[in-house]
Amino acid sequence: MANVDLKIHGKVQGVFFRQSAKREADKLGLVGWVRNDSDGSVEVLAAGSKDKLDQFINWCKKGSEAAKVEKVEVDWNETRDRFSRFDIL
């Protein structure tokens, strides 16, 4: 299992990005969380197989239907936290 921290920039708040990300993470069997950041970006910590995380990162580059993603920062980590599900914080 791998962990990835993501910071998604652009028009990603107020466009159902977090809810859509949760739905996508659940579909892929990922665990972790997604939250809005005060700078207008969205932060994600996701854990799962590298293949599924790669699929999730590709989804985040597009985002929800109304989102306009400008940039996704990706930081791969060793598994450090144990989650039982994917939450919206």
Image (cartoon, rainbow, N blue to C red):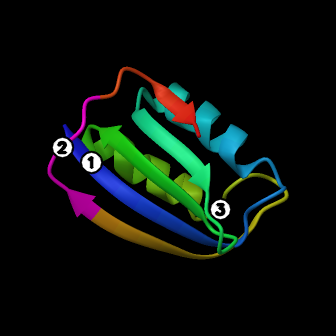
Separation (CA) of disc 2 from disc 1: 8 Å
The segment highlighted magenta reads 76-82
**Relative to 3, does residue 83 appear above or below in the rendering?**
above
- Mark toward the viewer: 2 or 1: 2
Residue 80: which disc?
2
Residue 78 forms part of the magenta stretch: yes
Tell me the amino acid under the disc marked 3: Lys
Q: In the rendered image of this protein, does residue 26 appear above or below residue 48?
A: above
Identity of the amino acid at label 2? Arg
Residue 8 placement, left or right of 46:
right
Q: Which residue is mark 3?
A: 62
Front residue of this view, candidates 66 and 78? 78
In the figure, residue 31 lies in which quadrant? top left
State which tag comes first along the sequence, 3 or 2.
3
Residue at the disc numbered 1: 3
Q: Position of residue 86 (x, y in %)?
A: 49, 30
- Which residue is found at the position 42% from the left and 26% from the top? 29
Q: Closer to the camera: disc 3 or disc 2?
A: 2
* Tag 2 secondary structure: loop
